[in-house]
Image: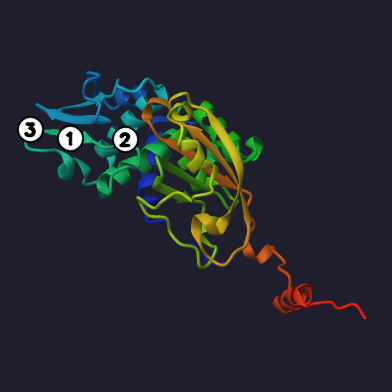
Amino acid sequence: MTRRSDPLLKVKWEADKLLQELGIDSLPVDPFVIAERLGIALQAMPSRMGGASGMLIHVAGQFGICFPTHIDSEGFKNFSVAHEIGHYRLPGHVEAVLNEQGQHVSAAGFRSSSRYELEADHFAAALLMPTRLVSSILKKAGDGLKAVESIANECDTSLEAAAIRYAQLCPDPAAVIRSQGATIEYAFMSSSLRDFAGLDWIRKDTPLPSNSATREFNLEATNISHSRRSEGDGALQDWFGGPYRQEVFEEVVGLGSYGKSLTVLTGMQPPDEIEYEDDDEEDQALEESWTPRFRR
């Protein structure tokens, strides 16, 4: 089985390198402390700046980070600060993202198509949820939403950031999906799920499967605003197409004031571990089931 190379490996290595430089080897990783140790000033943003996830500023030789307050989530703030540290540390970012006034308004949270924003997102995830420490969590946390919540709690990150890191590090076939209304905003697949040949890659604005628990869940706005959850069984083909007739276990949770929902799909088996019935035997059984029987 061929594993795809990770194009963001250097970005994640930069995060690991920073942790090593600062001697940080335990959870939770505090990005506010890291910023202070790097000599970066910190400032809360006015809540009215709801469209921005954070800012990196460079004035008179001094770097500063403005972090958001419009979403009441310490995990969201932590990720936002870690994202800005990514812009500060990653080669070429400062030169590319700062405008003439020495400012950059970020769109963190894996919602931008910009190369620099995505790199800063992955840097933040690797900084707050180091591979070795999170892999240790996964060994004892089970799978699915339970594992995602364990990562979020131990790393002090948002549920969404923890879910994406779960998909990146989970050894089993799994996927995490963010949606709003009837449409998908993004999907992350674990490496073992990406190895399933013939699956479709979910793109932004793809409709949710009509019979999915997530589609039904999103119909009720209070499910999301009250951070309720639901679960159900579904079909892998409904989500990703492909030739595999497999069931999936679907868990969905509302993301509160963020106005979106998060879905975790688990329970799939690698194709080479499944024994399907022989097609000839299936055809024969089907033919016999439809053959008329006449009484003598």
Contact (Cβ within 8 Å) of mark 3 with mark 2: no
Count neighbours of disc 1 (C-alpha within 10 A) and say few if under 14, some if 14 to 19, many if 20 or more: many
Q: Quadrant of residue 179?
A: top left
Label disc, if present, on residue 101 of the rendered structure = 3
Residue 149: percent from left, percent from top: 55, 31
Residue 226: percent from left, percent from top: 47, 23
Residue 217: percent from left, percent from top: 50, 36
Under circle 1, the secondary element is strand
- Residue sitting at x 41%, y 38%: 125
Under circle 2, the secondary element is helix
- Which residue type carries mark 1? His
Any part of residue 187 in sight: yes
Any part of residue 16 in sight: no
- Residue sitting at x 31%, y 35%: 83
Q: Left or right: 155 with respect to 294?
A: left
- Residue sitting at x 50%, y 63%: 199
| Circle 1 residue | 104
Q: Left or right: 288 with respect to 216?
A: right
